[in-house]
Image (cartoon, rainbow, N blue to C red):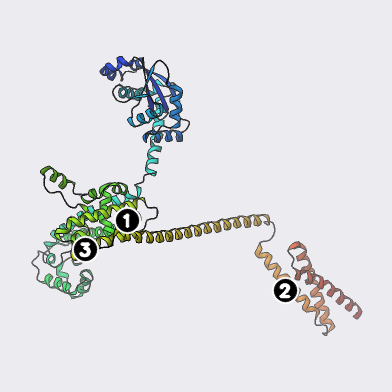
Amino acid sequence: MVVLHVLFEHAAGYALFAVREVEEIGMLLPQVEESVLSLGKFNSMVSLAAFFPFKSAQAALENMNAISEGVVHADLKLFLETNLPLSGKKKAILGVSDAKIGAALQEEFTISIQTGGVVAEITRGVRLHFHSLVKGLTAQAASKAQLGLGHSYSRAKVKFNVNRADNMIIQSIALLDQLDKDINTFSMRVREWYGYHFPELIKIVSENSMYCRLAQLIGNRKELSEESLESLEEVVMDSGKAQAILDASRSSMGMDISPIDLINIERFSNRVVSLAAYRLELQEYLRSKMSQVAPNLAALIGEVVGARLISHAGSLTNLAKYPASTVQILGAEKALFRALKTRGNTPKYGLIFHSTFIGRAAAKNKGRISRYLANKCTIASRIDCFSEVPTSVFGDKLREQVEERLSFYETGEVPRKNVDVMKEAVKEASDVASEIKRKLEKKEKKRKKREKKLQELAANGETNGEAEVEDGEADTPVAKKKKKKQATEETEEAEAVETPAKKKKKQKAEDVEETTDNGTEETQVPAKKKKRKTETDVEAAEETPEAVMSEKKKKRKTD
């Protein structure tokens, strides 16, 4: 007897459903499709055999990642080993919705796996009535679990996307191409609009952005004079052209234009000029991005053509997987299929035609040099994709090889062997990589040192704050310093008083009184400070009372 079990992966956990009357159900697929919508009919066919809820959101994410990659997770293996009847008289068949995970389960358990047909319809019914089939699970809880798992799964996929650096290049090259089209269209509109007023300017100035700047500068052609010749020269960068514009404005056949029309033309010209300036900034950004992501490809074929190849392939990884024959005709798919359909000549080049090498080659050598260039582009893209430290050494060497091959086609000069060139490149690349690593390590050490200093400063600040809090009742540090200075000055005065012993007795008596007053004040100040007294303060405090006592005795004798 055959027993069919259907595995269903939900955000809440794994569920195993037993299907009743498998053989009869398999014969009646239309009836199964109708009964899926009704819970009562569907419940009579399917019953819940086991349910394994996920312990946490992290566990759910790990299981879903494993299933999406076609790997049997430890939780799923334990669940099926526990609840699936692998041995016995009844032959067990496991139905799964995904063939990839089905193949992995078949290898793991050596059981027959069924996908599609009745299993697909039963899975659809289980997905519809899952919250009713599992006890204790509400529709709201199931939807919340699905929403949370969906967000975390998508976030993890975006976070660990290996092509996230390539996406910026793809978007910037697409925007650059769009800007080129828009600037060209808008410039033609300015030419046509301003041409009614000054038609001769189109013949003198052919460059679009320069024409728009001149239309913005000139405005009304009748107002041009010798004074505006310098400003014209700044824009045109040619004194002859500036003089020609001035002469043409005096004898122009254009119609007169109202001020309001001129204002609108100037505004539109300003927009076109700002777009052209932004295009230059975007090109510089693309150049810097290509030097970071694909430096060898950029050094070999140029930033713009390399970015177009990456964009057309979808990512740098995809471009690295392509063979050289595919890279050669990348971008010329229509011409290729048209040639295959009509049995004509296939295209020799696609996007790589925009590189300078094919333009410089002779007509008979264009196909040969494009094939050689595609080969080198494939090597460069693979080095960029899989190298740890990005350097442009290999790209420069590959470019030299293409230059040598080009000169070989023209002059017959034999180029260097590929083995020799690659040995040189490997040696230089290792030196450059070690230098870059050394610089990175140095930066990391500096950063750690700076962090350590900041931490020490923060710790010192905390300790100083605590010390200030403890001494909050005492005087401030500034007041303490002032008192110390005053004490030292008073002691010096007291010592100086002892030396003049040859003066008159009256003056000595007055001096003694002053010194006694000062001495008492001095002795009171260091008594309050306790441990903070210096050695000089102690000596002064010891000397002053002795001097006072000797002077008092002398005074008594005189009296």
Residue at the disc numbered 2: 489
Q: Is residue 167 left or right of residue 559?
A: left
Screen quadrant of the N terminus: top left
- Give how far across and how far down residue 40 sits, in percent: 34, 15
Image mark for residue 408 = 3
Screen quadrant of the C terminus: bottom right
| Amino acid type, callout 2 | Glu
- Give how far across and how far down residue 171 sits, in percent: 29, 50
| Amino acid type, callout 1 | Met
Residue sitting at 32 percent across and 57 percent down? 296
Going from the N terminus, do you reach mark 3 or mark 1 first?
Answer: 1
Residue sitting at 57 percent across and 58 percent down? 457
| Amino acid type, callout 3 | Phe
Q: Is residue 317 above or below residue 556?
A: above
- Give residue 402's quadrant in the image: bottom left
Q: Residues within 10 Å of mark 2 (few under 14, many from 20)?
A: few
Going from the N terminus, do you reach mark 1 or mark 2 first?
Answer: 1
Q: Is residue 411 left or right of residue 455?
A: left
Q: Is residue 271 above or below residue 497?
A: above
Residue sitting at 38 percent across and 29 percent down? 107
In space, the residues marked 3 and 2 are separated at their CA atoms by 95 Å
Which one is nearer the viewer's eye here, 131 or 169? 169
Q: Is residue 411 left or right of residue 310?
A: left
Which one is nearer the viewer's eye here, 559 or 176? 176
Label 3 sits on a secondary structure element that is: helix
Residue at the disc numbered 1: 290
Q: Residues within 10 Å of mark 1 (few under 14, many from 20)?
A: many
Q: Nearer the viewer, mark 1 or mark 2?
A: 1
Going from the N terminus, do you reach mark 3 or mark 2 first?
Answer: 3
